[in-house]
Amino acid sequence: MTAALQGSLMVDVAGTWLTAEDRHLLRQPEVGGLIIFARNIEHPRQVRELSAAIRAVRPDLLLAVDQEGGRVQRLRQGFVRLPAMRALADNPNAEHLAEQCGWIMATEVLAVGLDLSFAPVLDLDYQRSAVVGTRSFEGDPERAAVLAGAFIRGMNSAGMAATGKHFPGHGWAEADSHVAIPNDERSLEQIRAHDLVPFARLSQQLAAVMPAHVIYPQVDAQPAGFSRRWLQDILRGELKFDGVIFSDDLSMAGAHVVGDAASRIEAALTAGCDMGLVCNDRAAAELALTAAQRMKVTPSARIARMRGQAIASTDYKQDPRWLAALTALRDAQLIG
């Protein structure tokens, strides 16, 4: 008898409070997480209330946000406007500053009742991909790994698990996978020598990895997030990674190559993703949910590792470390 397929869905909601329809969706056991976007956010107190309302429905749900810094920062009003990670690299104490950024980001996200931010970006900056750009720490893989490792240390010390993205690297492909299906024509040897380096160096510090909606035709005809070659043979096998694999948003154009939302969630979970994100399209989320129910998926035990480990405190701004971290970033002219 074959083992049940492990996996679950991460979904979203439309507003700043839950509707009856939202609550019904969140009660489904195949739903394991919820991600919030800018439209769900007014100010810190409101986000804490929304988090509490979600946990009242499902205490076990994983609550996430994209809070990288720079242009990818959903929590804004009442939160530190962190710099883009690329801005850190030219500072003589870049490693220290990266750690402070990771700690500040994680502290603020945890304090509003969320578990994690999908960070850091491990893509390399080749100055080719507009969607990556300044979200990347560096173009040099070893330096990127050092700075990302420092950022992860900061996250971890605040109580947050880290998610490296977008495996095996989105920096070379020029198309934006939100609106197109990018291709990276390089060989596996070229990718191993460069883009895979940060993932390999940090494979034991990362609690999760998010694969790219990019096709690497010399390795596999499927995008990485739907590829057993990338997820099982290379990430799990070669890199010995045993953490969570989150799909990137399956509503993105780069995921449409495998069909409708039901086909996408099936392909992602079958390839080895522990949780599939289906965002900004409730009809697609419901279709994916129906597929997950039909597949009789069971939640992956790995997901529990992503829960926030710190007690959410709202008085973190009185912490001497907070003041020291802000001072370091201000002295480097990285924040106002």
Image (cartoon, rainbow, N blue to C red):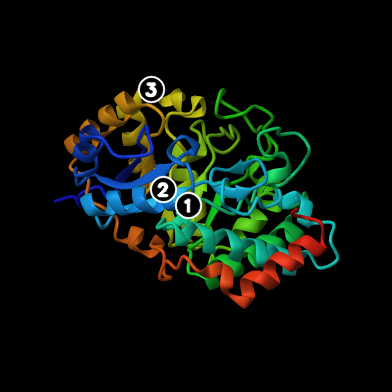
From the top left corner, tell me how far across and down residue 106 is, in percent: 53, 61
Q: Quadrant of residue 258?
A: top left
Q: Nearer the viewer, mark 1 or mark 3?
A: 1
Q: Which one is nearer the viewer's eye here, 325 or 65? A: 325
Residue 330 shown left or right of residue 293 in the figure: right
How many callouts does the rendering have? 3
From the top left corner, tell me how far across and down residue 115 is, in percent: 42, 58
Find disc 1 in the rendering and name its residue.
Answer: 44
Residue 173 appearing in the image: yes
From the top left corner, tell me how far across and down residue 215 is, in percent: 56, 32
Find disc 3 in the rendering and name its residue.
Answer: 259
Q: Is residue 87 above or below residue 108?
A: above
Mark 2 vs mark 3: which is more N-terminal?
2
Q: Which one is nearer the viewer's eye here, 127 or 186? A: 127
Q: Crowding near pointer 2: few (<14 within 10 Å), some, many (20+)?
A: some
Q: Which one is nearer the viewer's eye here, 189 or 226? A: 226
Give the alpha-carbon distance from disc 2 to disc 1, as whole Å.
5 Å
Find disc 2 in the rendering and name its residue.
Answer: 46
Residue 136 shown left or right of residue 140 in the figure: left
Q: Crowding near pointer 1: few (<14 within 10 Å), some, many (20+)?
A: many
**Residue drawn where x is 68% and y is 37% of the image:** 186
Residues at marks 2 and 1 touching, judged by CB atoms closer than 8 Å? yes
Return the mark for residue 325. Answer: none
Looking at the picture, which amino acid does disc 1 mark? Pro
Residue 284 shown left or right of residue 46 in the figure: left
From the top left corner, tell me how far across and down residue 19 is, in percent: 25, 35
**Residue drawn where x is 46% and y is 61% of the image:** 110
Looking at the picture, which amino acid does disc 3 mark? Gly
Give the alpha-carbon distance from disc 1 to disc 3, as whole Å.
38 Å
